[in-house]
């Protein structure tokens, strides 16, 4: 099976712009979770989608949103970008809900906000 | 706030030796899962090992094993016969998607 893929791999945006990141899970996986990874804050959970419904949400402002499509592909959107949003954004898929199951991570999208 | 603590930011070990990475966590649940993930340099994060809290027996996966102390809320990872390919960041995680800050492990030849 193909692994988790994320596009784009690298992105440079300007403060105030918005950005959409995409994640394609492993075939058959119904859960997609998103994480933000920074040197200062480490890995922080953004949200989890399962069967097109948001199941869990981390402690991030409403500028961060996501959705999941019927084929389990997921997108994450960040509006009104701030310098502090510069990070590696990881998505992970799992067969069932992420809590009890192994998560398979993608390579990440490196977002730089200038 | 509930936390996952990895008290060793960096560790190193000689090839073929054994190393233990520590992790403590906070939870009010009685039944839960714990995970160790490995993130090699410039490579994707992968699961190393998973422990179910209701199981008394410590999980083992080849050279990787855990020492799970439920009462102490401690979940350490032991790597035996360390190999150069074990060089990576290691993250401890709970089933509510909280991750520790990570331990950077370097295996020296």
Image (spheres, coloured by chain):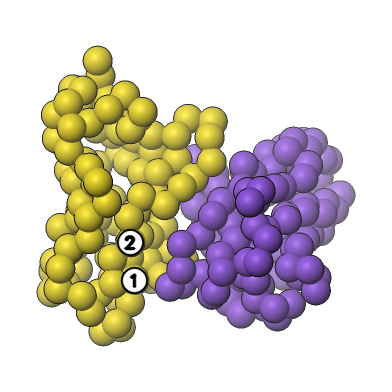
Chain colours: A purple, B yellow
- Dot 1 crowding, Cα within 10 Å, few <14, some 14–19, many 20+: some
Numbered tag placed on residue B50 in the rendering: 2
- Nearer the N terminus, badge 2 or badge 1? 1
Image position of B61 with respect to A39: above or below = below
Q: Is residue A52 visible?
A: yes
Percent position (x, y) of residue B74?
A: 18, 62
Do the CB atoms of the residues marked 2 and 1 lie less than 8 Å apart?
yes
Percent position (x, y) of residue A48?
A: 61, 70
Percent position (x, y) of residue A39?
A: 50, 40
The local secondary structure at tag 1 comes to strand
Direction from residue A79 to residue B78 in the image, left or right = left
Q: Marks 2 and 1, Cα distance to the nearest angstrom?
A: 7 Å
Could you say which is closer to the camera, residue A72 or residue B103? A72
Direction from residue B75 to residue A36 in the image, left or right = right
Numbered tag placed on residue A38 in the rendering: none
- Dot 2 crowding, Cα within 10 Å, few <14, some 14–19, many 20+: many
Image position of B106 with respect to B35: above or below = above
Residue placed at 33% from the left, 61% from the top? B50
Q: On what subunit does the disc labeled 1 rest?
A: B
Q: On what subunit does the disc labeled 2 rest?
A: B
Q: Which residue is mark 1?
A: B33
The local secondary structure at tag 2 comes to strand
């Amino acid at each position: 099976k193909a692994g988790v893929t994320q596009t784009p791999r690298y992105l440079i945006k300007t403060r105030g712009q918005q950005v959409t990141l995409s994640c394609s899970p492993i075939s058959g996986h119904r859960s997609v979770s998103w994480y933000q990874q920074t040197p200062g804050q480490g890995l922080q959970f953004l949200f989890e989608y399962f069967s097109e419904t948001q199941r869990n949400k981390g402690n991030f402002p409403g500028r961060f949103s996501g959705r999941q499509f019927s084929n389990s592909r997921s997108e994450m959107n960040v509006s009104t970008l701030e310098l502090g949003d510069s990070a590696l954004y990881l998505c992970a898929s799992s067969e069932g809900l992420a809590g009890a199951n192994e998560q398979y991570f993608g390579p990440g999208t490196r977002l730089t906000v200038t | 706030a509930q936390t996952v603590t990895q008290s060793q930011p960096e560790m190193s070990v000689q090839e073929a030796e054994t190393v233990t990475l520590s992790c403590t966590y906070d939870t009010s649940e009685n039944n839960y899962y714990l995970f160790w993930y490995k993130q090699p340099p410039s490579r994707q994060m992968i699961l190393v090992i998973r422990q179910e809290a209701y199981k008394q027996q410590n999980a083992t996966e080849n050279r990787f094993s855990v020492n799970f102390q439920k009462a102490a809320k401690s979940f350490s990872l032991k790597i035996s016969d360390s190999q150069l390919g074990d060089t990576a960041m290691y993250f401890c995680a709970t089933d509510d998607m909280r991750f520790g800050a990570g331990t950077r492990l370097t295996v020296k030849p």
